[in-house]
Amino acid sequence: MSGVKKSSKLDLLVRVRYSNPLPAPPCPPKLLEIPTNPKRYARPELLTSIARQTPLPMIVDADCGMPLDLSQYECLWDESLDDSVLNPSADILPKLDPRDELLAFEVPTASTSNGGTNNPGTQTLTANVSWLRKTEYTSKSESRSNVTESTRDVDLAPVDVSPEAQIHAIEDTFKNAHDNFDISTLRHPTKPHLHAEESFELLPDADVWANQYMLFRFAERPGGRPVEEEDPRLEVGIFRPVTINDESIIAYYLNEDDEGAAEYKAARESVVPYDIPITQGTIPFRFVRDYSTTTATEGEAQTEFLLVIDEGPSAEEDVFGDEEDDQYATKSRPKGAYYKDISRKVALKRQRNTANLDYAEKVDRVNLDFTKLTEKEEDTRDAYRAQVREANWIQTEEEHETQDVEMAP
């Protein structure tokens, strides 16, 4: 076995060594002139970007191209001499050079709609508009400027801005809206076959005007239950704002079971608003998770409102309470559509790594109880209600501010 020679791939490579000299050309080279278009080698469009990128030196002398030789004026060296050459009076002006007469041309300010001018003998100048602009837009702007010039000299009558005059003007608008009003003429803006059946007056909701409502949108369903399963705890959830490393987040709390949510909801509905319900101790809420917030301002999102349709008073319907206990009964308000604006919209996303996140303000359990409003909170609520209930609220606020300024030391 040791006598067998191993084959190598190098044995298949053979280097061929031979010379192949080329013979000299039989005749000298000849230069041929072939006509061609220079645009084949370069396009003129490329010069635009090159010229734009090439910096041009601004060579300006100390006099900015307008040398002034002040040594020719002797009045600058001797104050007793006449300086009318440098400071001519308005009555005696120097003679205008013929080459500068074009600069003294006055542009006419008023023109008629057919292209002529009010003053004969003057030239008509059109506005400098883009060549892509339509001609009807140009004619409209010219006619609008003519109307502005004609109404500029008209004396306007004084406007009464007193609170009584403003209230009277607002009441007149409602009167004009109700005169000759036919509900059958109201049609749907996009579905003409639909027409209005009933109309309501749009009024601010004075009962809840002091409250601030916020709209929270979750990126996913909270609570941990599937979508097809009903979760009554979501109707009574608690949002608690906290701060972690200068970052505002929302801690979300829910009842431990459905019975606790039903108990809390029944306690709220057992009394009129702002009254304290009677409960068997506190209502527990447990921490679910933290959410990061993204607030949409009024300029970023469309304004939304809460709208309540009230059919008005009814003699057969007990609005609140029953016949045996009338102390909780409330007066029904007039028929109308009552609105309240939503002050803020917040988008909630799950905060990462919240399981092991521990901070000073973290609370794992909340025991909820009801308490009465303080005197300051009641005054604040009444002040907000006065904005929509009292007609002279603005005048009253101005009087209070004036009194506060006078009492200040």
Image (tube, grey):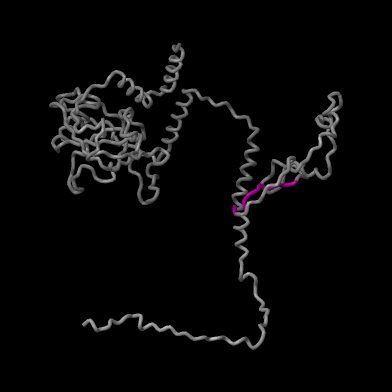
The residue nearer to you, when weighing 236 against 292, is: 292
Magenta includes 19? no
Q: Residue furthest front?
A: 3
Residue in the foreground of this view, choosing between 177 and 64: 64
> What residue lies at 14% left-to-right and 24% top-to-bottom?
324
- Residue at 65% over, 38% down: 149
Which residue does the image show at 39% across and 38% down from the upper left? 297
Q: Quadrant of the C terminus?
A: top left
Is residue 33 shown above or below 366?
below
Looking at the rendering, the stretch of residues picked out in magenta corresponds to 123-133
Q: Can you tell which quarter of the image residue 276 is in?
A: top left
Which quarter of the image is occupied by the N terminus? bottom left
The question of residue 129 being in magenta is answered with: yes
- Can you say whether 44 is above or below 234 in the image? below
- The spot of residue 244 in percent (x, y) is 30, 34
Classify residue 372 by image quadrant.
Answer: top left
Vertical placement of 33 versus 392: above or below? Answer: below
Residue 293 is situated, as x and y percent measured from the top left of the image, at 32, 39
- Magenta stretch, main secondary structure class: loop
The image quadrant of residue 110 is top right
Residue 191 to residue 338: above or below: below
279 on left or right of 106: left
| Percent coordinates x, y for residue 77 in the rendering | 83, 28
